[in-house]
Image (spheres, rainbow, N blue to C red):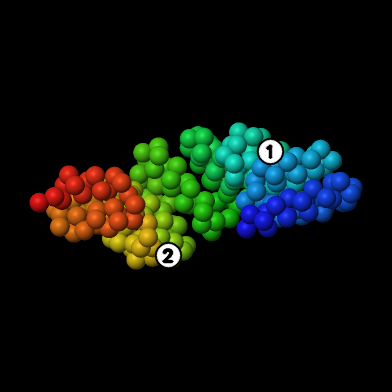
């Protein structure tokens, strides 16, 4: 994979040296992005933007490379430029919401996600991210409503059950939370957080032996906090 990435780099810089078309450079930038070479892809798109400063797609690609590198403020500036050109670019709105989320600007993220859902009420990831934003604002009923919708739209995504379980846990709906964590585990048995949070829920439900089994499983999957809890709460 490393050799392959180096090959892409060599090929992608050749068009610039040979004065090939900007379209070819864009293609190379996308290849680098898809190979998770975000910094190199960003450099190519920055070069192309100088030639096409009002191109919606190029600005979007540039913003995406910055978002992938957690350059969230730069990404937001470029998503804003995209939306000045096309205020209905739903993916730019959604990605800007993610950048605001990473900056802990949850209400700004929610504003964008509201707009996304106005444009497409079935945009499942918008419900998931908005639910997480509400959760971080400690507005758990709102987060629960969004995770309910995410689960309804795609009942095969483990993380949505996990997130809904967390909302229910914070609302002291422990039996329902335990059900959600169990469903998340059914879909993905390799995620320690699912076992850890189900363990905490089971302690609240006075299911201590089962809770200890979950802590043990979480610890075996590499969760150090679960190992500490296991020693503290489950030692004979």
Q: Pinpoint residue 104: horizontal percent, then vertical percent.
A: 48, 35
Location of residue 64 in the rendering, given as x and y in whole percent from the top left corner: 64, 46
Label 1 residue SS: helix
Q: In which quarter of the image is residue 159?
A: bottom left
Q: Residue at x 51, y 57 (%)?
A: 124
174 relative to 57 in the view: left or right: left
Relative to residue 79, is residue 225 drawn left or right?
Answer: left
* Mark 2 burial class by Cα count in 10 Å: few <14, some 14-19, many 20+: some
Q: Which residue lies furthest to the front in this view?
A: 3
Which residue is rendered at x = 58% and y = 55% of the image? 120
Q: Mark 2 points at which residue?
A: 155
Seen from the viewer's position, the closer of residues 189 and 64 is 189
Between label 1 and label 2, give the one nearer the viewer: 1
Residue linked to disc 1: 78
Q: Which residue is drawn at 73% across and 55% down?
A: 7
Left or right, 201 with reference to 54: left
Neighbours of disc 1 within 10 Å: few (<14), some (14-19), many (20+): many
Q: Which quadrant holds residue 160? A: bottom left
Q: How many labels does the image show?
A: 2
Distance, label 1 to label 2, CA atoms, is 34 Å
Do we see residue 76 in this rendering?
A: no
Give the residue displayed 43% in from the left and 45% down from the top: 132
């Amino acid at each position: 994979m490393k050799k392959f990435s180096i090959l892409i780099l060599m090929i992608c810089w050749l068009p610039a040296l040979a004065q090939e078309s900007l379209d070819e450079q864009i293609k190379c930038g996308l290849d680098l992005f898809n190979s998770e070479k975000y910094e190199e892809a960003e450099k190519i798109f920055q070069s192309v933007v100088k030639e096409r400063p009002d191109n919606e797609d190029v600005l979007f690609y540039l913003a995406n490379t910055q978002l992938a590198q957690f350059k969230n403020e730069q990404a937001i500036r470029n998503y804003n430029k995209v939306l000045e050109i096309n205020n209905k670019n739903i993916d730019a709105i959604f990605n800007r919401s993610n950048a605001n989320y990473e900056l802990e600007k949850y209400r700004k993220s929610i504003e964008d996600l509201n707009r996304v859902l106005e444009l497409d009420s079935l945009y499942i990831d918008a419900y998931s991210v908005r639910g997480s934003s509400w959760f971080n604002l400690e507005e758990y009923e709102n987060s629960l409503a969004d995770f309910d919708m995410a689960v309804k739209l795609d009942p095969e995504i483990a993380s949505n059950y996990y997130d809904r379980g967390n909302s229910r846990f914070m609302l002291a709906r422990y039996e329902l939370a335990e059900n959600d964590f169990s469903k998340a585990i059914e879909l993905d048995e390799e995620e320690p957080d699912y076992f850890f949070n189900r363990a905490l829920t089971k302690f609240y439900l006075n299911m201590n032996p089962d809770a200890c089994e979950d802590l043990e499983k979480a610890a075996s999957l590499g969760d150090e906090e679960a190992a500490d809890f296991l020693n503290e709460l489950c030692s004979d």
